Image: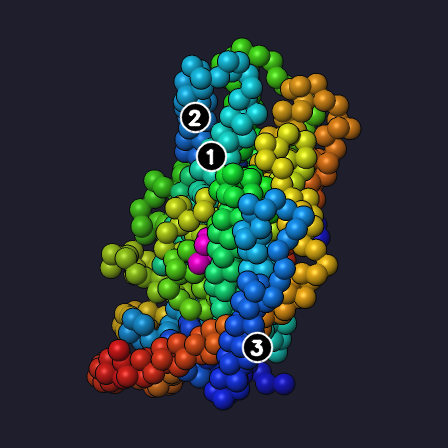
Amino acid sequence: MKHYLQVVWVILWKDLRIELRSKDVFTSMAVFAVLAVMIFNFAFELRVPDKTVVIPGVLWVTVTFSGILGLGRAFISEKDRGSMAGLLLAPVDRSAIYFGKMLASLVFILVVEAFLLPLMVVFFNTNFLSLPLLLILFLGTLGFAVVGSIFSALAVNTRTREILLPVLLFPIMLPVLMAGIRATIGFMEGDTLADMMKWFRLIFFFDILYVVVAYLTFDYVVEE
Amino acid sequence: MTLSRSLLRILNVIALIGMLLAVYMALIQAPDAVNVDPSIRPAQRIIYFHVPSAWSSMLAFLVAFVSSILYLVTKHIRWDIWARSASELGIAFTIAAVISGSLWAKPAWNTYWTWDPRLTTYTIVLLLYIAYFMLRGAIDEPSRRARLAAVYGIFAFLSVPLTFMSIRWWNTIHPVIVDAPSNENKFGLGPNMLQAFGVTNLAFLLLFVALLANRISLGWAEERLEALKDRLHF
Amino acid sequence: MSTALIEVRALRKAFGRQRVLKGIDLSIAAGSSVVIFGPNGAGKTTFLRILATLSKPTSGEVRISGVNVKDNPEGIRQYLGLVTHAPLLYEDLTAQENLRFYARLYGMKDAEPRIQELLERVGLWHRRHDLVRTFSRGMVQRMAIARALLHNPPILLLDEPDTGLDPQAAEMMTGLLREIGGSQRTILMTTHHLERGLELADRVLILVGGRIVFDQRADAISYERLRPIYDEYVGEGAVT
């Protein structure tokens, strides 16, 4: 068990280390996120009486679209460098590799969010941030990383790879997006945490369910 | 193994008779729905087609889900053939359900499309299983294709209830422009129509079983053809 | 119990309908150096990948020290080192960071002295703080050998380690392998290069069309005798 956690941690550490050096993934995710927010801003500016009403949708859609850039790279980088075999040779249950890669993707997306949120506060000129909102954003991002990471490992073995990943991922992510957007609307309109509890429960259940399924199926995804 | 050819033929004939009976029951035997507006009474009869299609599609996806799990456990090609056959049928029945639902919506609610939880969920399900076949199409090596498709099939099936819940909760909070039917009675199903409803459902179940058996038998034929091609160095 | 370290019984592997390995039986004694020759597509890589637990056989079994690999793949991996044409290294990590990463994957304690020892042995200690992306192909391949030997595995699997190396680098690698092979380590290597392979081997196998068609002690056969035999099998293999 100690070795298992060590492997999870060292894969996370390795991905962060490489990202700090190359900044490939983070830069493209962040630039994409800024562009998306600006485009949404222009798209809604003249047609929507109060721009703040589109914040929940813009936030979740931007997170989803920029997140998929990072998720797509997660396993492609291992596969193309041939280093995937090196990970699979580790004398440990292979789900440890999944959890290491998943946590790395989670950190990437959270960092992009940490950059995106203040930017949106400035662009939309409204402070819509609150603790419950950050919490549901975290839970939603977790679900996104959980499912996205295993689909990234799956898509990397196909001919179409990056094109396929969003097609596989988005229909399954729908409950998280619905719950996330709905709860964000609620918090911006001053609803209490108790009112929004069912959305938390939905995302929480989604996260738990798919962590378990990913844990059980990852070995089948990477075996030959 | 695959059903013998004569058994398959008998099954096909039974399913055909069942469907002919279903058409008779739905269009002629069943009385008009008196509790709905007279202008949509003919349209109401679509329920005998729409609801069994929806149930058959869910049954198909359940079969695909179980087969996917069995494939991962046993690695036997039979379960891959089952999973892909059932998923295909699921798509066909889902399209039938979405289109018939939409056709009913036009006279009843004056729109082809509503964000009714069931209709929306079915459309998402359609996209899920189109993605399933895109995944299959993007992998050349048969055992890898079967393995990865099985994993996706499991994820896809489990997401269906979550999607349904999220859309339903969304709609109950927001005002809905068009009032969706909250139960079957609003579809106009009186007790004197239950007979026709039961027969059509049973007929669709038979149709589903017959189509699945045929599709699986076709799947085996495809496998044999590929094996023959290999042997002849095609 | 037999004395063989690696026991392969009726091993078959098919990718869908394409049969790559068609029944391999082989026992390898501890401490031996076995070289497998064969043309492209003969199944050499697939065979080594199965031994390395990266691929699962369709049927048949592999036992290492009497343990069926299927029963405990995690435990078996501790005993294996693998060198492939891909170096399995991260270009954006330094030489030292790469080895530290692998040391932790293998759960090694106090890996630093071992890392230093290996980097010195492959002549890259002075470059330990440089990113692997700045290394030449030969240096990368030496790093790959250091990486594979890091956890001191009793079995070393090499899948065409000389591919893409210039003759000089390949020569250096052969010397390195002979030196660190020692008498305890069991080495299993595939290559196209008959001369270089013979230098290292004490047993020679030829794998064609998913079957082992030739198996002899290396000291009983010279390059001049092996060449025509190999050409004959490979020519035959191309037809079937």
Q: Which chain is home to disc 2?
A: A
How many numbered dots are placed on residues in this image?
Answer: 3
Q: CA distance from mark 1 to mark 3?
A: 47 Å
Residue on which the image places disc 3 = C63
Any part of residue C80 in sight = no
Q: Do callouts 2 and 1 point to residues on the same chain?
A: yes
Please tell me which residue lies in front, B151 or A9: B151
Instruction: In the rendered structure, find residue C207 and report the number of the disc placed on it.
Output: none
Q: What is the residue that sits farthest to the right in this orientation? A: A194
User: Which amino acid does the dot numbered 3 rest on?
Assistant: Arg
- Judged from the image, the secondary structure of the residue bearing numbered disc 3 is strand
Disc 3 packing (10 Å; few <14; some 14–19; many ≥20) = some
Residue A196 location, x and y as percent?
Answer: 72, 30
The residue indicated by pointer 2 is: A36
Residue nearer the viewer, B35 or C97: B35
Is A45 positioned to the left or the right of B198 in the image? left
Magenta highlight on residue B181: no
- Mark 1 residue crowding within 10 angstroms, few (<14) / some (14–19) / many (20+): some
What residue would you read off at disc 1? A65
* Residue B134 placement: quadrant: bottom left
Q: Position of residue A110 (x, y in %)?
A: 57, 30
Residue A174 placement, left or right of A192: left
Magenta part of the chain: B129-133
Q: Residue visible at 70% across and 18% down?
A: A190
Q: Quick check: do tags 2 and 3 share a chain?
A: no
Q: CA distance from mark 2 to mark 1?
A: 9 Å
> Is residue B146 placed above or below B223 in the rendered structure?
above
What amino acid is found at the position of numbered circle 1 in the picture? Phe
The local crowd at label 2, few if under 14, some if 14 to 19, many if 20 or more residues have their Cα within 10 Å, is: some
As drawn, C1 above or below C183:
below
